[in-house]
């Protein structure tokens, strides 16, 4: 399923609630950014690379790794998340799709 998701798929979920199933707890988060990166793919059937940024509430920082991320519109997905840095609203995590 991950191979069929696009930036546009996630853009429809901007500012919606997500749950990140971290090792110590289920963390409430929201998708705050979905953007295309790099050059558009010229091969037919290949998607444009993109990245997502989630903001998790609170200051709990978990290490990069694969986590189950859940959203009402998309269901449960296993995403590799990398912590970016905290901001005023919580801790930000990035997922990159090639």
Image: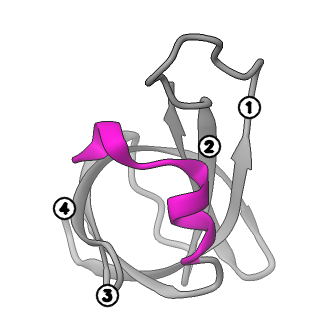
Give the residue pinned by disc 3: 72
**Element class at badge 3:** loop
Q: Residue at x 59, y 51 (%)?
A: 7
Q: Quadrant of residue 40?
A: top right
| Direction top: furthest residue | 43
| Mark in the foreground, 2 or 4 | 2
State left or right for residue 62 relative to residue 57: left
Residue at image mark 2: 51
Left or right: where 15 falls relative to 74: right
In contact (CB < 8 Å): disc 4 and disc 3: no
Magenta span dominant secondary structure = helix
Name the N-terminal-most of marks 4 and 1: 4
Task: Quickly name the residue at label 4.
Answer: 23
Structural distance between the alpha carbons of marks 1 and 2: 7 Å
**Residue named by callout 1:** 37
* Labels 4 and 3: the sequence-earlier one: 4
The boundaries of the magenta stretch are: 1-13
Could you tell me if the residues under marks 1 and 2 are in contact, i.e. CB atoms within 8 Å?
yes
């Amino acid at each position: 399923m991950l191979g069929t998701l696009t930036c546009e798929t996630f853009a429809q979920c901007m500012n919606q609630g997500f749950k990140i199933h971290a090792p110590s707890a289920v963390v409430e988060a929201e998708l705050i950014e979905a953007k295309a990166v790099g050059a558009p793919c010229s091969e037919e059937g290949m998607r444009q690379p993109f990245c997502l940024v989630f903001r998790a509430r609170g200051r709990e920082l978990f290490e990069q790794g694969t986590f189950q991320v859940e959203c009402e519109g998309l269901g449960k997905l296993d995403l590799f998340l990398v912590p970016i840095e905290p901001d005023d609203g919580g801790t930000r995590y990035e997922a990159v799709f090639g």
